[in-house]
Amino acid sequence: MPPKDFISALEVAQRAGVSRSAVSRTFTPGASVSAETRRKVTDAAEALGYHVNELARGLMRSHSGIVCLIVSDVATPYRSALLRELTGKLQNAGKVAMLINTDRSDGSVDRALSQAIRYRADASIILSGLPDASIVRLCLRNGQRLVLINRDDDEPGPLKINLDDFEAGERIVTAFARAGCKSLAFANSDAGTPSLMGRERGFVAAATRCGLEVSVERYGWTGYEAGRVLAQRFLTRSRRPDAVFCATDLLACGFMDAARHQFGISVPDQMCIAGFDDIEQASWLSYGLTTFAQPVAEIAAKAVGWLSVDDNGNDNGLQSVRLTAELVWRTSIRAA
Amino acid sequence: MPPKDFISALEVAQRAGVSRSAVSRTFTPGASVSAETRRKVTDAAEALGYHVNELARGLMRSHSGIVCLIVSDVATPYRSALLRELTGKLQNAGKVAMLINTDRSDGSVDRALSQAIRYRADASIILSGLPDASIVRLCLRNGQRLVLINRDDDEPGPLKINLDDFEAGERIVTAFARAGCKSLAFANSDAGTPSLMGRERGFVAAATRCGLEVSVERYGWTGYEAGRVLAQRFLTRSRRPDAVFCATDLLACGFMDAARHQFGISVPDQMCIAGFDDIEQASWLSYGLTTFAQPVAEIAAKAVGWLSVDDNGNDNGLQSVRLTAELVWRTSIRAA
DNA sequence: CGCTTGTTTGCAAGCGTGTGCAAAGCTTGC
DNA sequence: GCAAGCTTTGCACACGCTTGCAAACAAGCG
C-alpha cells in the first residue's frame, strides 16, 4: 500500500472540470455555488474519497473548531459523566473535543493550555486545576474562550460555572435535623478546592446556627479509599456522630461501606449519610445514597452555549453562572 | 481587549533580528541553529508569547500529532479507565488525543472516522462500534493507523487488540466447580459483541464438557440495570442457579444487588458470582467481586506503542495482539 | 436591444509553517 | 595565506485551503 497523500481540492476540481475555488465553496456552507457545479463537485469528491483538510481550513479562518477539555481524574464517575455530556454537546455544536489529561502533577494545567494555544483551539474548558493568571490572559488576548467549571477564580474574562455549594451544606443540615440527628460530621478531602470548602463552610455554619454539635475531618483525595479512612477516624471516637455529610459521593460510598461492614453500623437507622454529585453508584441498591445532584447536563449546556455565542464583539457580559444542586432523596437519611 | 491574532513566527523573527527560518528551526528539534540565535529567538518568543501553530506545522509535515479516540459510553467505569490510560500514554508519546463520542446511534463510527480524516489524524483508536470496511480502507490508504480494541474484525491493516475471552469463560467454570457449584448460569447483554459472545461460548463449552448444568440469558445493554433484570429472570425460575458468571462487572453488580436485597440470597454462601473487567467498584466492600481484570495499562501501552513504530515502511508485521485477563480473587466465590 | 441588477465563477493573494538549496561564515591544516 | 570542510543562515517554494475582487454570465425590464 503506497502511502499516497490525501486527495486535495485541486484534484477534485480537475476531475470535476471546475476551478479549485468551486470545490472550496461547495464545502463552505452559505457560499455561492450553482446547483449544477455543486453536483459535479460532490460527485467527484465522492469518487475520489475527498475530505476537507480542517488543518488548512483552520489556518485561513481564525477558528479551528477545536475545543480543549482540560481534566484530571478522567476515570472518576462524576468527571466522566461530565465528559460525556460535554463531548456530546460539543459535537452537536459542530465542534470537536481535544482531551488533555492533567493527571501528572507539575503545573500541567499551564502546559495543557499552552498546547491548546498551539493547536489554535477556539476555547478551553477547564474541569480540574487552576491555570496561572498570566497564561489565562494570553489565551484571552488571542480570542480563545475559557470556561472554568467548579473552580473559583476572580480573574475576569473566563466564564465561571459554579454550584450553590454553601447553600447545599446548609440545606442538608436541616434535613439531618428533621431526621432527629444531634451530632453532625463533615467528611472532607484535604484537596481544599473552593467547591469542597464551600460545602464544608455552609454545613458548619448552619449546624452551629442550629445549635448542633458538628466536627470536621479532612483526608486525602476525594475517592472511595479516603471515605473509608475518614469513617475510621470518626467511628473510633468515643462519641460517634449520628449524621455525616460527605463532600463527595465517592467519599460517601467508602464511608458507608466501612460503617456497615467494618463497624456494623446500620444506615440510616443508627446513622444518616449524605453525599454530593449523584454519581451512578449512588442509586445502586447497596447504597441508596441521598445526595445532591450535579446538574451535569445543564453545566455542559451552559458551557457549550457560551462558546457558540456570536463572536461579533458583544461579549454579552455573561461572566458567571450559578446553578443549584438539587437534593435527591433515597434511603440513607431517615424519614422525618 | 482587541481580538488581536496570534503571534506568528515572522513577528518573532523581526524582533529577534533574524530570518523567519531561524525561528522555525529553533522550534524544530534536531535542526541546525547556533546557540546565539537560538537564545535570541527564544527570548523574543517568550516576550511576545509565541506558540508554534501546530495546524500550519501539520500542514507541512504530513502528520498532525493528533490521535482520535472513538468511543461510546464514555462514562462507563471500564471505558473511562481505558481512556485515562490512553490519554496519559499518548501525551507521553508527544501526541494529542481527540475524543469522539459515538453515543448517537446511526453509523456514527463512520462519521467519527471521517472527522478523523478531516483533521488528518495520524491514527484512530476505536473502542466502540465497528467501522465500515470501505472507510477503513480509506483511512489506511492515506497512511492513517488504526487500532481496534476488543472489536474483532478480519479486515487486514488495523492492529487488533483482544483478550482471551473464550479461555476466561472456561477458567471460571473450573473455579465454580471447585467451589462445589452444580448449576451454572451466564448473564449476558444482548449486544452481541464478539468479546461478550466469546466469554459466553467458552463458559458453556467448558460447563457442558464438565457435565454441569448451564443456562444463558441475554438482555439489554451491559449496565447495572440490565444486571438487575437478568437476576429477576434467573431467580424467579423454579430451579435457581448456584453460580453465575456475568459478562461484565456492571452486570455483576446489578445482579448481586438484586440477589441480595430483593431475593435475600447470600453471596457467596448460596450463590457464587463472577464478573469481567475489574472496574473500581468490584473491589468495594459491598461487592468484593471476583472478576477478570482487563489489563487496561497494557492495552494502552500496546496501542500507543504500535502508533510510534517507525514509519519507514516496515510495518513490522504486527497485526494482532492477544492479552490475557487475569482472574482476581475476592469474596464472591466460595473458597475451595 | 440596451441597461441594470443579481448570481456564478475564476484568479490570485494570502494563512503560518517546514525544508532543500546555495551562499556565507567559521574552523582547521598545511 | 589559501583551500577544504563543516556549520549556520537566508531565500523561496510548497502545503491545502478561504475569500475579496472583478470578470462573465443570466435575467428582468422598458
Image (cartoon, coloured by chain):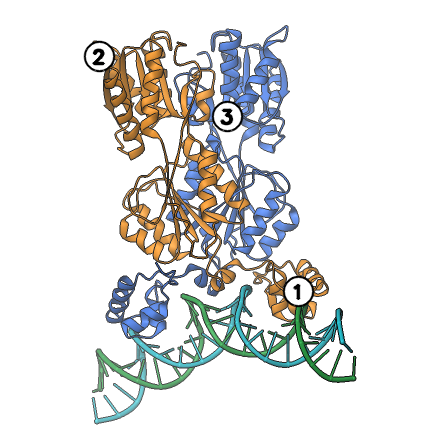
Chain colours: A orange, B blue, C green, D cyan
Q: Nearer the viewer, residue B38 or C4?
A: C4
- Examine the rendering and report whether any part of residue A192 can be seen: yes
How far is disc 2 from disc 1 in space, using C-alphas?
77 Å
Q: Which quadrant is the N terminus of chain A positioned in? A: bottom right
Per the image, the residue denoted by label 3 is B276
Q: Label 1 sits on what residue type?
A: Val
Subunit that carries the residue with mark 1: A
Q: Is residue B36 above or below residue B124?
A: below
In the rendering, at what x and y percent does residue B304 appear?
A: 45, 46
Amino acid type for the residue under numbered disc 3: Phe
Q: Secondary structure at mark 3?
A: strand
**Contact flag, marks 1 and 3 (Cβ < 8 Å):** no
Q: Residues within 10 Å of mark 2 (few under 14, many from 20)?
A: few
Q: Secondary structure at mark 1?
A: loop
A36 relative position to B309: left or right = right
Check disc 2 and give the amino acid type.
Answer: Arg
Please tell me the numbered disc located at residue A237.
Answer: 2
Which one is in front in this view, the residue at disc 3 or the one at disc 2? 2
Residue B245: x and y, percent?
54, 19
- Read off the residue under disc 1: A33
**Closer to us: mark 2 or mark 1?**
1
In screen coordinates, is D27 left or right of B66? right
**Closest to the observer: A65 or B84?**
A65
Labels 2 and 1 in the same subunit: yes
Which tag, 2 or 1, sits closer to the chain's start? 1
How far apart marks 1 and 3 lie (CA) works out to 55 Å
